[in-house]
Amino acid sequence: ATHFKIDGLKAEIEGKEILKGINLEIKGGEIHAIMGPNGTGKSTLASALMGHPKYEVTEGAVELDGEDVLEMAVDERARAGLFLGMQYPSEITGVTNSDFLRSAINARREEGKEISLIKFIRLMEGKMKELDMNPEFAHRYLNEGFSGGEKKRNEILQMMMIDPKLVILDEIDSGLDIDALKIVANGVNAMRSEDRGFLIITHYQRLLDYITPDFVHVMMQGRIVKSGGPELAARLESEGYDWVKEELGIVD
Ligand code: ADP
Ligand code: MG
Ligand code: MG
């Protein structure tokens, strides 16, 4: 089973410390949700884990199945099984969705064991159907001219095709209507397995009505300040974050 561990992670952007010591352990089969007010460093955490060059890790350790993630280059992290689905994925002109997916899948495979074209097409068509996506999206340039909802559905398509060990979804639910939200949630639920952990970053509890997390963490000012179960998300939804601040004596 997969085992992912973040230990005392600190990171800064342009000399400003954003992550101030994050500790988090995710085992295969578990879904963890991170909630928190805007600007507390949730996206910074996702980007730092993926190795985005803008974020400098200054302290701490990250391990995936005993391997040192921070030592890996960006493409090595993807190959090792880290996946980030984003709110605003990049548009890439000249690369079709299916080309991108096929090379992403093959990057996770050993040389000589690449997926055959026929298998790939069958897999992609099946997943696109599950996600209720128009088949023409396979041949469109990656995210170019996709609506917000289409981009997010496409991020979930990537997740389903790439078969990662650790899935990070950063506000994948924002701006989705209820039908799209359910499709995204079904995709995640179908991917739940002992070989995969999930870190779902969300501003709203809404998504967690459809994906039941095992653990909910509250992030404030670059730290996880409180952890609990799904009931914590429900309380944050109804009461906001002020009570957490009061309870912990956080001043902003
Ligand atoms: P969240 O995802 O929780 O809303 P972010 O991780 O996006 O928070 O941002 C955390 C803090 O880092 C904010 O104060 C934000 O202004 C700052 N920040 C994020 N990205 C950058 C960047 N590229 N350059 C400078 N500051 C940034
Ligand atoms: Mg934000
Ligand atoms: Mg964010």
Image (tube, helix red, strand yellow):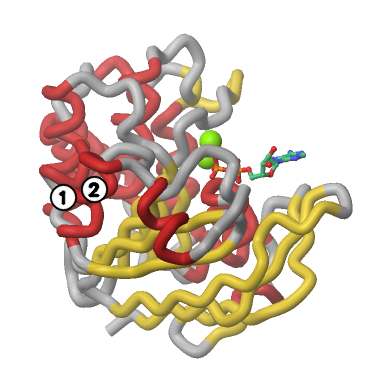
From this view, report whether residue 252 is shown above or below residue 31.
above
Under circle 2, the secondary element is: helix
Task: Give me the residue at 49% from left, 25% from top.
Answer: 142
Q: Name the residue nearer the viewer: 171 or 52.
A: 171
**Which of marks 1 and 2 precedes in the sequence?**
2
Disc number placed over residue 119 in the picture, else none: 2
Q: What residue did someone put label 1 on? A: 211
Q: How many marks?
A: 2
Residue type indicated by callout 2: Lys
In front: label 2 or label 1: 1
Q: Is residue 23 left or right of residue 231?
A: right
Residue 66: % across, % down? 50, 89
| Residue shown at 23% from the left, 58% from the top | 232
Q: Is residue 132 above or below residue 224?
A: above
In this rendering, the answer to whether 75 lies above or below 148 is below
Q: Position of residue 245 (x, y in %)?
A: 46, 55
CA separation in Å, label 2 and label 1: 29 Å
Marks 2 and 1: CB-CB under 8 Å? no
Rendered residue at 31%/79% (across/down):
27
Give amino acid for label 1. Ile
